[in-house]
Image (cartoon, rainbow, N blue to C red):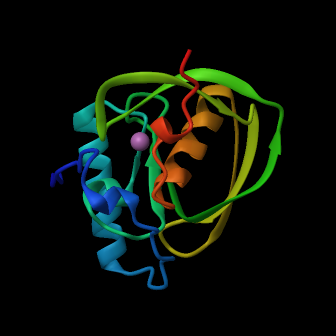
């Protein structure tokens, strides 16, 4: 069990563009394991590496309270379909929830922790989560995109 600190909005690290992972080694696995512990402890749905201060293109997500962890390394959105507006939050921006427009369906190509290619297909909340986490890898926060009325 090794939790890491979650960087909070205002920290410039969250605004950096993360670099692709090139080594699928034990440092990456340690990062992923620590991110899992951090996400489960924080009771969130998704966590991107820059949120723990690591500028690598990595995110994780869980949609069943931590029983199943989705790991995505070097993720890319390759297909989107439809649109949906729904409230979002972020572990780096406590107590704020705002509406964001995201694709209703997404297809993401990525790699697993061993460097094997994977395809993640998601809809609705899960699609929004993947888009939100991938935005983190480009220094974008959901509040940049929120629909304020
Ligand atoms: Ni977030």
Residue found 58% across the figure and 44% down from its top: 130
Measured from the top left, where is residue 83 in percent x and y? 77, 29
Q: Quadrant of residue 14?
A: bottom left
Compared across the picture, whether 89 is left or right of 104 comes to: left
Q: Is residue 102 visible?
A: yes
Residue found 29% across the figure and 60% down from its top: 12
Residue found 51% across the figure and 76% down from its top: 20
Q: Is residue 70 visible?
A: no
Q: Nearer the viewer, residue 108 or 10?
A: 10
Measured from the top left, where is residue 15 in percent x and y? 39, 59
Q: Is residue 115 above or below residue 36?
A: below
Q: Quadrant of residue 103?
A: top right
Measured from the top left, where is residue 140 in percent x and y? 49, 51
Measured from the top left, where is residue 78 in percent x and y? 77, 58
The residue at the far bottom in this view is 23
Q: Across the whole image, how many numbered discs are drawn on residues?
A: 0
The residue at the far top in this view is 149
User: For the C terminus, which image quadrant?
Assistant: top right
Residue found 35% across the figure and 24% down from its top: 96
Split into quadrants, the picture shows ligand 1 in the one at top left
Q: Nearer the viewer, residue 49 or 10?
A: 10
């Amino acid at each position: 069990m090794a939790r890491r600190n979650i960087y909070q909005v205002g920290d410039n690290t969250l605004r950096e563009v993360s670099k692709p992972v090139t080594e699928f080694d034990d440092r990456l696995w340690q990062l992923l394991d620590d991110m899992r512990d951090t996400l489960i402890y924080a009771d969130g749905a998704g966590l991107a590496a820059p949120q723990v201060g690591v500028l690598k293109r990595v995110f994780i997500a869980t949609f069943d309270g931590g029983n199943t962890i989705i790991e995505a390394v070097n993720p890319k959105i390759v297909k989107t379909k439809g649109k949906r507006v729904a409230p979002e939050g972020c572990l780096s921006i406590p107590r704020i929830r705002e509406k964001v427009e995201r694709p209703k369906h997404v297809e993401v190509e990525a790699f697993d922790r061993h460097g094997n290619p994977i395809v993640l297909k998601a809809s609705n909340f899960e699609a929004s989560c993947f888009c939100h986490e991938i935005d983190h890898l480009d220094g974008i926060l959901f509040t940049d995109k929120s629909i304020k009325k």
